[in-house]
C-alpha cells in the first residue's frame, strides 16, 4: 500500500500558510496597517472555508451521520482530522483482515506495440485512502489558486510599496509560492489520471522535477509581472484582472452553449438542477483562477460526464503560452514607461529581460516534460515536436510576404506562353502526319 505522502504535504502547507498568515495579520495590526491586515485575513479565511466544503463534498459527509466531523470542519480543523484518519487507516491496514476486496482492471502502457490488461485487488482500506488522496488533491488546488496566489501577489505588492521585506513576510511568501507550485503540480497529475484513467500510470521523479521547475518559473514570473504593473498603474489593475478572469470563466460555458448539449445531470445524484449549476459555476471559477496564473493542464468540457476534455490539444496550449507571453511583455513595457521613483535603484531593462527569459525557461521545461518525461507519451497521437514543427511552418507561411512578379519573371512568362503556342501547331502537324502514314500503310496492306 502506497504511503500517503501527498496528504502529509497538503496538510503541512495548509497549516504552515494559515499560521504564518495569522501571525502576519497580527504584525499588521500592531503597525496600524488596517487595510493590509484585512486583505491578508480575507485571503487566509476564504480558501480555508472552501477547503472545508471540498472535503465535506468529496466524502459526502452531509448524507452521513457524522456530527463531530462536521463540527470540526466548522472550526476549520477538517484537514487535521482527515490527516489523522488517513494515517490511522494506513497503519491499521496490515493488522486487520479485509472483509471483502474489489477487483479493478487497468491496462499497462504499450510495450512493443501491445497493451496488456492487468487485474488488481483493492481492499476497503486502500479504497478509503484513494478517496482521501483525491480529496486532498482537490483541496490543494483550491488552496493554491484561490488563497496562496492572491496572497503571494498581495504580500509582494506590499513589499514593493514599502521597499523592504521583513523576515516573517519573506517566509510567508516562500510558503505561498510552494503551495501554488504544489497545487499546479497536483493539477498536472490529476489531468493525467483523468485523461488516462484506463491505464496503470506511474510518474517518475524526473517528471516531478520537470513539472516543479516549469511551474516555479511560470508562476514566479507571472506574479512579479502583475505586481510591477499594479504598482505603477493601479487604476488599470482591476480591468486587466477582470478581463483575464471573465475570459476563462465564460469560455467553457460558451463552448457548452455552442455544442447545444443537454444540461449535465450526472455529476452527483443527490444534487438538484440548482445545485449542479452551483457546482459547475464553482468549477469554472476555480478554472479561471488557475488560468490567471498558469496553464491549467486541462480543458473543461461541461457536456462530458467527466467534465474534462480528454483529447490532447497542442494548439490550445500553444495559443495560451503565446498570448500570455505577449501579455506579460506588454505589461512590462507599460511598467517600464510609467515606472516611478521607487524603482530608481533597479536596472529596469535587465529586470524586464530576466522576467521574459524566466518565462521562456518555464516553457522550455514544459516542452521537456511533454516530449521526454510524460508518463503516457507513448499514447500521444502526435508528439510536442510535431506540433511545434506545424506551428513554425504556419508562422513562416504567415510571415513570409508573397513576392510580386518582376520584369524578368513577366518576360519569362511571356516566352513560355509563346513557346506553348508555337508548340501546339507543330505537335498537331506531327500527329496528322503520323495519322496519314498509318492510313497509307493500312491501305497498302
Image: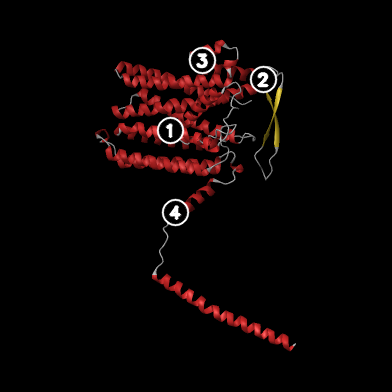
Q: Secondary structure at mark 3?
A: helix
Whether residue 223 is visible? no
- Expressed as whole percent of the image width and height from the top left, the position of residue 219 reads 43, 34
Tell me whether circle 3 and circle 1 mark residues in contact (CB < 8 Å).
Answer: no
Q: What's the CA distance linking mark 4 and mark 3?
A: 56 Å
Q: Which residue is mark 2?
A: 94
Q: What's the CA distance linking mark 3 and mark 1?
A: 31 Å
- Expressed as whole percent of the image width and height from the top left, the position of residue 253 reads 50, 33
Tell me whether circle 3 and circle 2 mark residues in contact (CB < 8 Å).
Answer: no
Q: Earlier in the sequence, mark 4 or mark 3?
A: 3
Q: Earlier in the sequence, mark 1 or mark 4?
A: 1
Residue 328 occupies quadrant: top left
Whether residue 167 is visible? yes
Q: Which residue is mark 1?
A: 246
Left or right: residue 146 compared with residue 110: left
Q: What's the CA distance linking mark 3 and mark 2?
A: 29 Å
Along the viewing direction, whichever of 347 and 399 lies nearer the viewer: 399
Tell me whether circle 1 and circle 4 mark residues in contact (CB < 8 Å).
Answer: no
Disc 4 residue crowd, few under 14, some 14–19, many 20+, Cα 10 Å: few
Name the front one of labels 3 and 1: 1
Q: Which residue is mark 4?
A: 398
- Expressed as whole percent of the image width and height from the top left, the position of residue 28 reads 33, 19
**Residue 398 position (above or below residue 101):** below
Q: Earlier in the sequence, mark 3 or mark 1?
A: 3
Q: Secondary structure at mark 1?
A: helix
Report the quarter where the C terminus lies.
bottom right
Q: Which residue is mark 3?
A: 73
Along the viewing direction, whichever of 224 and 165 lies nearer the viewer: 224
Q: Secondary structure at mark 4?
A: helix
Name the front one of labels 1 and 4: 1
Amino acid at each position: 500500500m502506497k504511503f500517503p505522502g501527498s496528504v502529509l504535504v497538503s496538510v503541512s502547507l495548509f497549516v504552515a500558510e494559515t499560521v504564518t498568515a495569522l501571525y502576519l495579520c497580527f504584525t499588521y495590526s500592531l503597525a496600524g496597517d488596517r487595510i493590509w491586515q484585512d486583505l491578508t485575513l480575507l485571503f487566509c479565511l476564504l480558501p480555508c472555508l472552501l477547503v472545508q466544503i471540498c472535503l465535506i463534498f468529496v466524502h459526502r459527509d452531509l448524507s452521513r451521520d457524522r456530527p463531530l466531523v462536521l463540527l470540526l470542519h466548522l472550526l476549520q480543523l477538517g484537514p487535521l482530522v482527515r490527516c489523522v484518519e488517513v494515517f490511522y487507516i494506513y497503519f491499521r491496514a496490515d493488522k486487520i483482515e479485509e472483509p471483502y476486496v474489489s477487483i479493478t482492471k487497468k491496462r499497462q502502457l504499450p510495450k512493443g506495440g501491445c497493451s496488456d490488461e492487468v487485474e488488481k485487488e483493492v481492499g476497503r482500506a486502500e479504497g478509503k485512502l484513494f478517496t482521501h488522496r483525491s480529496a486532498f488533491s482537490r483541496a490543494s488546488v483550491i488552496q493554491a489558486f484561490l488563497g496562496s496566489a492572491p496572497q503571494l501577489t498581495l504580500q509582494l505588492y506590499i513589499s514593493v510599496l514599502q521597499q523592504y521585506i521583513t523576515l516573517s513576510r519573506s517566509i510567508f511568501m516562500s510558503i505561498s509560492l510552494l503551495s501554488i507550485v504544489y497545487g499546479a503540480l497536483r493539477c498536472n497529475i490529476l489531468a493525467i489520471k483523468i485523461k488516462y484513467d484506463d491505464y496503470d500510470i506511474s510518474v517518475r521523479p524526473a517528471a516531478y522535477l520537470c513539472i516543479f521547475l516549469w511551474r516555479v518559473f511560470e508562476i514566479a514570473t507571472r506574479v512579479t509581472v502583475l505586481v510591477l504593473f499594479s504598482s505603477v498603474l493601479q487604476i488599470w489593475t482591476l480591468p486587466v484582472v477582470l478581463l483575464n478572469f471573465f475570459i476563462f470563466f465564460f469560455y467553457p460555458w460558451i463552448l457548452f452553449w455552442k455544442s447545444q448539449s443537454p444540461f449535465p445531470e450526472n455529476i452527483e445524484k443527490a444534487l438538484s438542477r440548482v445545485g449542479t449549476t452551483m457546482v459547475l459555476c464553482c468549477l469554472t471559477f476555480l478554472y479561471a483562477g488557475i488560468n490567471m496564473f498558469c496553464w491549467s493542464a486541462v480543458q473543461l468540457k461541461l457536456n462530458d460526464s467527466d467534465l474534462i476534455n480528454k483529447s490532447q490539444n497542442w494548439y490550445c496550449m500553444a495559443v495560451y503560452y503565446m498570448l500570455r507571453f505577449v501579455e506579460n511583455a506588454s505589461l512590462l513595457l507599460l511598467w517600464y514607461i510609467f515606472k516611478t521613483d521607487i524603482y530608481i535603484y533597479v536596472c529596469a531593462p535587465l529586470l524586464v529581460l530576466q522576467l521574459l527569459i524566466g518565462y521562456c525557461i518555464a516553457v522550455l521545461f514544459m516542452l521537456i516534460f511533454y516530449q521526454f518525461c510524460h508518463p503516457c507519451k507513448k499514447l500521444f497521437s502526435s508528439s510536442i515536436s510535431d506540433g511545434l514543427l506545424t506551428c513554425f511552418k504556419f508562422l513562416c507561411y504567415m510571415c513570409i510576404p508573397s513576392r510580386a512578379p518582376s520584369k524578368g519573371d513577366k518576360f519569362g512568362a511571356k516566352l513560355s506562353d509563346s513557346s506553348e503556342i508555337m508548340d501546339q501547331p507543330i505537335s498537331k502537324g506531327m500527329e496528322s502526319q503520323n495519322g496519314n502514314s498509318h492510313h497509307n500503310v493500312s491501305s497498302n496492306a
